[in-house]
Amino acid sequence: MRRLGMGLVLLLTMGSTAPLSAAEYYPMDWSEAVTVDKDDIGMNFTIDFSGKAGGDYTNKLSAAGDFTFTGVTNAGRTFNFDYSLTNTSSRTSRIRAFGFDTSGTLDSLNATGAFTWEYKDVAFPEQVGTMDACFAAGSGCTNHASGGVTRNNTGSGSFALTFATAMESVDLERFSLKFVGLSQNINGQNWGVGLGSIGAITAGAGPGDPITAPEPATWLMMILGFGLIGYRQRKQDDIRGQFSFLTRASLHIRRGERARTKDWGTHTLGDRRGGIVGHEPTAGRTEQDAATGARLRGLLPLQPRGG
């Protein structure tokens, strides 16, 4: 939720994005909100943090944040996120804490990873004001103590926001973080803050589209289509069966003709044993072949042996 005490300061910054004088610098979109719908699971957004120290802008402090919404639990009361914060400052420093404001009434906070200390309603320095949620790397959200993400390193984890009632969506705004442990003073002090501007926003997968049954006309077309496919398949099977039968019959006839031709070609027309020339049917002949052989024996003359 936005702080009315910041209204005058924000109005003074609406005309320019350039750094202003002491106690007046705030990014134009610092108070813009990211709206997270409870069904937009997988939604991702980035936050670019610019530095502020001694009331004035500094390019020696900066950070990049990446946040992903992972879904709701606790009957719609708890919104869960993954986070990562990278310290991109050019000056030696540590990110000691980060926070933001939310819509709705927060009941409790929980966090894992690099920032596991949770605080509600924290007074942040550099005229940031009171923040609804703050996550720190150690005791005290704004303390100048040990711990935190050092320059050129990334801290990651997850956090959960539990509200007093179930929420359809939540707004997150005024992202801020605390820099400590500066190797050299900036604008007269050895600490500063980072003020966040919304970068890229990528929608999540969402709950998915509902599965609907086909219309009656669609069902009819599907049934007719499957019936036609089955009819054509049966016709093709019948044609293949008839062709296979004719092929087998033809092969059988040709084999029979070859067998008879072989029979007649391998048998002699005479048997010289006993001085009688004749033709004796073999065991492999058919009855018709045997009858034909008998007729031939009656037609051929008998010849004596040695004739």
Image (tube, rainbow, N blue to C red):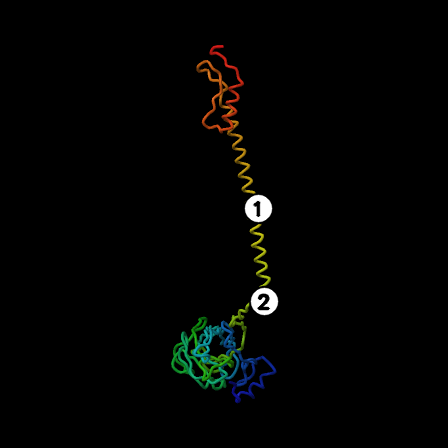
- Residue at 53% x, 17% y is 300
Q: Nearer the viewer, residue 261 or 34?
A: 261
Q: Residues within 10 Å of mark 1 (few under 14, many from 20)?
A: few
Residue 278 vs 158, above or below: the answer is: above
Secondary structure category for the residue under label 1: helix
Estimate the x, y position of residue 139 in percent, counting from the top left: 38, 81
Q: Earlier in the sequence, mark 2 or mark 1?
A: 2
Q: Is residue 276 left or right of residue 217?
A: left
Q: Looking at the image, which is closer to me, 291 or 128?
A: 291
Residue at the disc numbered 1 = 239
Question: Residue 16 lies in what quarter of the image?
Answer: bottom right
Picture residue at 52% right of the left edge, 15% below the top:
301
Q: Are marks 2 and 1 in contact (CB under 8 Å)?
A: no
- Amino acid type at circle 2 is Pro
Q: Position of residue 43 (x, y in %)?
A: 51, 73
Is 197 situated left or right of 107 in this image? right
Callout 2 secondary element = helix
Residue 216 is tagged as: 2
Along the line of sight, which residue is nearer the eye, 52 or 251?
A: 251
